[in-house]
Amino acid sequence: MKRHLLATAIALSFALGAHAQAPANGSEPRITMQLKGGWRFHLGEAPSAEKVDFPDGNWAPVTVPHTWNRVGYYTTPSPDRVNTPDTINKTQGTGWYRLSFTPSGDFKGKRAWLQFDAVSRRAEVWLNGQYLGRHEGGFSRFRLDATAALKPGAANLLVVKADNSKPAPGSTTADILPLAGDFFVHGGIYRNVALIATSDIHADMLDHGGPGIYATTKTVDGNSAQVQVAIHARNSSSRKNKVTIVTRLVDATGRTVAEGTQSANLPPGETVKMEQPLSVTHARLWQGTTDPYLHDLVVEFQDGRGQVLDRVTQKFGIREVRVDATQGLILNGKPVRLHGVGLHQDLEGKGWAMDETDIAKDVEIIREMGANTIRLTHYQHGPTIHELADKHGLILWDEIPLVSAWTPPGKMVATEGLIANARRQLQELIKQNQNHAAVVTWGIANEVDFGSTPVAPFIGITSGSDPAPLLRELRALSTAIDPSRPTVLATCCEGGMFGDAQIPIVATEADLGGANRYFGWYYGKPSQLGANIETLRAARPSQPLAITEYGAGGAVTIHTDDPLGGPVDARGRDQPEEYLSYFHEESWAILGARTDLWATWLWNAFDFATLVRKEGDAQDINTKGLVTYDRKVKKDAFFFYKANWNPAPTVHITGRRYVNRAYPVTHIRVYSNAPATELQLNGRGLGVRRDCPQKICVWEDVLLDQGDNAVAAVGLFADGPVRDSVNWTLDAGSARAFRIDSGALVAAPSEHGRFGSDAFFTGGTAGSVQPASGYGPPRPRKVVNGTADTMLISTYREGDFTYRLPMADGTYRVTLSFLEPTAAPGERQFDVLANGEKKLRSLDVAALAGAPMTMVSRNFEVKVTGGKLVLHFTPVKGKAIVSAIAVEAI
């Protein structure tokens, strides 16, 4: 059985341009013409551009998919950067598109439809000067009846006005979701466009962009299955028609495994809805990643002579899914542990205008990681990702763009327009994706429970406004359209992360629960995640719960020697790649051990564009992705999950981009799922680690060589060794000294040699005299007197703490630098001991400085024997403190 041309529009788009079309023949009642090339584009207002005689000769030639936006770039110089400050375009407004095309004469006598897979975020369409209509919502397919305006066999002019203006009261997009969100809403015709011809009798082309046929697996009993097919038959003619509808389920070999036939009288200008049950014996089920078997669902409309008036083919997987509060997701009677990623639809250099090849590459990267599920956030994604998920067995969460804000600024309730738009986008989401076996749940909202948290004012949430009524309406609508799938939403804030802020409890407004939790990033520590999950489970023990987001930023050009050396800057620049790895190691240690979560999705698969961030090594990029925005770098944390999730042999040395090392001694970490892993340094064997916990193999206190260091890890698998290697360097200055920026996660530059970030410590807590980054503009830096190294001295470690430095025996000079952040003279006093010998007594930094924010330095000599220098900072009164340590050979 040939697949219907509409269903294969994506495949055809590679070959067909604006003036090419699929051939009309007796086997295919529909004609599909892809409209990709030949467009002209103008950014900005263009009065009268919809008119046929409008001059567009100076407009830019473009190909669809297209967006005018380029947002987000990495700040570190590189010759292969796609986005740079010079190529960025953040314009949110109006863009015009014009296309001249000639459909074949075969379109004559047919019903013609223009199909747009997405235009952001508001579209108005004219054909040959006639206004066809508009669509509000930037993520879903829509169709317009072009029959009266189309001129078959002649030149036609298609004009589209796209508007991605930021919603504001009184604007053209005021009532179009999303109102907020940590992602950039690109503009343009960023998915495919096609002209489709059908007969007057057709599966309803105006059913919210859906195929007009919708199948549901009702029951699976052993080897048999019952499938119910809803058919929306449309008669667009002016007279009554009687049709025979033949419904078949066809397996991958072309064999019909179930069939049903019925007749229907179709009144003129109306749609008739019918149900067709199919009984499948010896059914081969869709089993997720283990066996993603797909059938073809074929529905034909025939006249009294048996001529096929319309045919629709949809891929369909027979499967039964339910979600249990304790067992998680159960697919065809068997629990499946879901672990995967959240996903945005953008790529550096292309924005949202990703083609099928780009999306396929993304899916392959996600599959390489070993994920078996994707949360499609925070809006409806296109047909390609859904088809690939069906093909590869990846479970999908779909959702609409009801993100954070649901009312206009300063308002307590949503407008009627916003409510109508939310309903329409949900209807489109469900209708267009209902036949996909991969989709298991409909998401009705994300993070609408910020309440009175400090975040709320930046989103535009009015204190005391209640999202529950809107959520209830959307839940009821979803259940009415598709009762076979549960509703779900993701919450942000329940559980005390924001102190005593008033948080609306909205989790009960959906069938399934999902929680976005960032312990160890925006608040708390990673170890606190488990307790928060227990709180949520205790509040609603009968509701299935998932962790829908957890993650941290990670810049591949920023590094730390110890991820616990200082506070991570969730809103600023100190976001080293090593902290990202630490965060995921700690978080997965908790999540991977739990069997009572129906799914977990890390945030995010890839770095993506936003306008609210100046963080890490990027501008307008959220760096929580495990792969960079340009897909060129898979961060270390990617391989942590690959080693744990993908059974394929994996060996990966971490810290590979931290090439120029600050310390002569380091721990070397390798992600390996080998039974045994061997490490080598410059050809010397450093030992073997076996069955490493969490697939993390560690060699502690490895002494690096001055100059080049070739590090190799060899995983000893049953089928043979797998090798990974990196090259690091250690300059002469760092080889002979330990210079520590105390209290710093990322070492500051210094005029007195290369410093590393805080490391080798036990005890104490990190602090800084500089104001922490937060929401809003950066706060001004304070100046430290008595030094040019303000940022080096600004951080500190305080308390009762010890540094243990593995060093060669010999005589060294120790230089300690101090800054008093808060105490008055006499309030803080402490001793400093070196290998048990008291070198500094009752040190009072405030008294010695004589003025606030003034550096004090002290130095002494020490003789090291036994390969270790132990510096102990012990309080006499208050807490001990130090800002920088330098230990250099004499």
Image (spheres, rainbow, N blue to C red):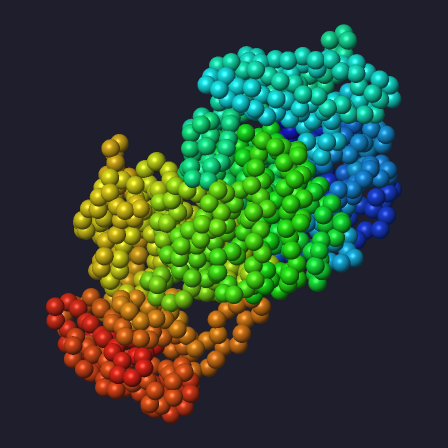
| Relative to 262, 604 lies left or right | left
Q: Is residue 829 above or below residue 526?
A: below
Residue 812: x and y in percent read 19, 76
- The front one of 799 and 359 is 799
Residue located at (71% from left, 28% from top): 33
- Residue farthest along the left direction in this orientation: 866
Could you tell me how many numbered marks the image carries?
0
| Relative to 457, 684 lies left or right | left
Residue located at (58% from left, 31% from top): 484
| Relative to 612, 307 lies left or right | right
- The front one of 446 and 752 is 446
- The front one of 15 and 217 is 217
Q: Is residue 328 visible?
A: yes
The quarter of the picture where residue 667 lies is bottom left
The quarter of the picture where residue 7 lies is top right
The quarter of the image holding the N terminus is top right
Residue 22: x and y in percent read 69, 23
Q: Is residue 36 above or below residue 175?
A: above
Residue 88: x and y in percent read 62, 56
Residue located at (22% from left, 68% from top): 805
Q: Is residue 628 visible?
A: no
- The front one of 8 and 229 is 229
Residue 101: x and y in percent read 77, 33
| Relative to 382, 155 lies left or right | right
The quarter of the image holding the C terminus is bottom left
Residue located at (84% from left, 39% from top): 131
